[in-house]
Structures are given as structure tokens and as C-alpha cells.
Image (cartoon, rainbow, N blue to C red):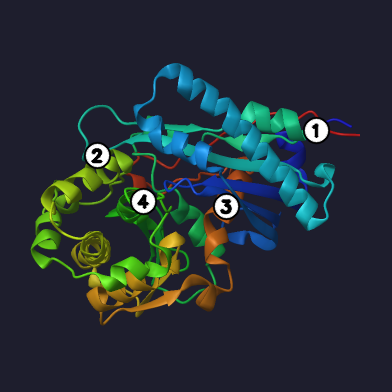
Amino acid sequence: MSAPSIEDLRRRDERRIAGLMSGTSADGIDAALLLVRGFGLDTRWTLENFLTVPYPDGIRRRVLDAIDARAPEIARLDMELGERFAEAVLALARSAGRRLDEIDCIGSHGQTICHIAPPLPGPRATLQIGEPAVIAERTGIPVVCDFRPRDIAAGGSGAPLVPVADSILFRAAPHPLAILNIGGIANLTLIPGRDADPSGFDTGPGNSVIDGLARLLPGEPPCDRDGAMARRGRVHGDRVAAWLGDPYFEAPPPKSTGREIFGTPFVERIVREMPDAPPEDRMATATAFVARSIAAAFRRFVPPSERPEEIWIAGGGARNPALVDALREAIAPIGVAALEDRSGLDADAREAVAFAILANEFLGDRPGNAPLATGARRRAVLGMWVPGWGRE
């Protein structure tokens, strides 16, 4: 049996799409299986299954180091991650009790290893790896991939891309709506009304600096689990104030960032500027810095008319009670609520679900970017098509 074409899938009443996402923290691959009907704001969707496949420690370390890697290492890692993404689809299908030929398409974001956008100088560029040809070959399922480059070609920064998906996923939610994802980088989606154009921007660091400090500790724990270390430390307010003076925070949206600014270079700055502080104080100060940078961005760049009564939060940072408490204090009187508590969608699944939705928009020949979020000159269809080969 041959794999379906774009035209075949566009004509179907419903499509079953697997969404794949691995974020800046490089914890692993999130995989979501959606049953989707329609396109755009008429989309109806059902989440059939979700799982996360963690990266082995060696792979995660290579992903985090890839920003400074040479071409041979990047080429090898690209192919290896393609195998990992394919394995995630196989695991998703098994967990859902679905045959591979029941999955019509895969929307794969890939793994970002480089993202250059304003306010960084020079030409804009982005690179996601996790070779889609490998995913298609191992599964037989067609893949929509490379969502970000077309937005950059249209004058945008290639991020954030989830606002369009959020406007579809949460159309029935109360508006104005603000959704905060705290991954390696923290980003906001803003939707002033059900039929209004969404916007959004990266507020700055998320787990990138917290996890970076954790990796300096004996045994290299991947994170400050449950914020336990931050709870034991003392916040150095003078350092928080100094770090909030970084030029990124002054730059107005649309804007996006990555580990180029808030990865290893910023972790090294923390250590350099707090040389005698105990690790607990560094962690507490970094956690407060992340929370206050989000709150400052919200107050500075979100018009009062678009501010909701509470922000819905998702991503790994939403699982860090110390960070969530610091954010509640910093952003009051705006409330903070977990995404799943308000929408019913698992916060960990949101981005994988989003890229299944964006793959569906590609199939419908519909734009997937929001110029108010990325700065693109126009709305553009995002993604590239890698055919499958079908299965008997």
C-alpha cells in the first residue's frame, strides 16, 4: 500500500497525525497522536495518546554541546536523532494500539541546536536536526518538517511558532488568553480574542540557566528537581537586578532567543559574578531571575487591554514549585494556573500537539506563522514534505 499524498490527506474528513517535539532543554522527545478534522479555526481535534521518550545521557550531552560542534558531529547527530524520533513514533503507535498505516502523517519539529535572531547581530538563521528522511524511511509515514526556515525567509525570526496552534487549540477558552511555556527558553502566547490574530515572544531564559547550574554539580543532576536546591538558598537581589539589565530584555517584540544567549554563556556569567556563593544561593538567585524576567516582560510588552486575570503555564518549568512560586510573587496580581487545570490538555503534551496542528495546517495549505509573533512580512505556509512509502 502506498503512502498518502498531500492531496489525499487534504481531502479526507479526518487525519491521524503524530506530533514530535524536543525542546531547548533536550530532555527527550515528546510524541502526541491527534485525530484532526478540518483546518484553521474550524479544526476539531482529539488527543489519542501522548508519551515522552527520554534521551540517554550521552545523546543529551551531545545535543547540548552541538552549538559548538563541527560539521561531522552535527551530520552524525542529525542522523542519530532521526532514528530516535522514528523510535518515538513506533513507541507512540504501540502505546496507542495503532498500526503504523493508521497514522497518516508525522509533524516533526526536530531538535534545535542553533537559533540566531534579533537582538543578536547578523543574518537570521535556525537549525533543527533529527533527519526527517530517516523518520519516513523507518515508519513508512510521510513527514512534515522544517517549520521555521520559511518564516525566516519571509523576514521573521522563525520563533515562536506555537501562537497559531494555540489559537486553534484554545479557541473556546476565555479571552484575552496568555499561555506561558517555560522550557529551556520561556515564551508567551497572547490571544486577545477568539478571532483575533495571536502574538507572542520569547521572554528570555527558562530552564536553560537552572539546568545549566545543575550540570555543574557533582553527579551532574539534569535539573533542580522540585526546586529543592533553590528553596534552600538565598536570593542575591543585586545580581538579579544586574542580569535584568541584559540588552535582550530591553528589545521590544517580536523577538526570540536561545541558548546562544541564555545557555552556557549566561551560566558562566552567573558563576563568574557569584564566585564565593554556595550552589544553593546561585540556584535560588537564578530561579528568581527567571521568574522576574518573565514578569518584567509581561508588564513591559503586554498591553493592559490584552492582560488576562491569570496566565496558564506549561513546560518543564511548570513542574518546578520554587520557580512557580517565584513567578506568582513577581507577576501578582495576575494569577498563575497550570495549563492542564484550565484546559484539560497535559502541559507536557502541548508543544508536540502544537506541531501536529501545524502539520495539519501545512496539509491544508494554510499559514502556520503569526507575523505579530515572529516579525515576518506576511503569513506563510510552514513546513517541508518528505514522502512516506506506505506499509502492507
Label 2 crowd (10 A; few <14 / some 14-19 / many >=20) = some
Q: Is residue 147 visible?
A: no
Amino acid carrying label 2: it is Pro
Amino acid carrying label 3: it is Ala
Q: Residue at x 43, y 42 (%)?
A: 379
- On the image, numbered disc 2 is attached to which residue? 118
* x and y, in percent, of residue 358 in the image: 56, 47
* x and y, in percent, of residue 325 in the image: 32, 76
- On the image, numbered disc 1 is attached to which residue? 3
Q: Is residue 18 visible?
A: yes
Could you tell me how far apart the alpha carbons at marks 4 and 2 are, in whole angstroms?
A: 36 Å
Secondary-structure class at tag 4: loop
* Most distant residue in the top direction: 72
Q: Is residue 2 above or below residue 186?
A: above
Could you tell me how far apart the alpha carbons at marks 3 and 4 are, in whole angstroms?
A: 32 Å
Amino acid carrying label 4: it is Pro
Circles 2 and 3, Cβ within 8 Å, touching? The answer is: no
Assign the N terminus to one quadrant of the image. Answer: top right
Label 3 crowd (10 A; few <14 / some 14-19 / many >=20) = many
Closer mark to the observer between disc 2 and disc 3: 3
Amino acid carrying label 1: it is Ala
Assign the C terminus to one quadrant of the image. Answer: top right
In-front residue for pair 97/391: 97
- Left or right: residue 334 compared with residue 21: left
Could you tell me how far apart the alpha carbons at marks 4 and 1 are, in whole angstroms?
A: 49 Å
The mark nearer the N terminus, 3 or 4, is 4
Circles 3 and 4, Cβ within 8 Å, touching? The answer is: no
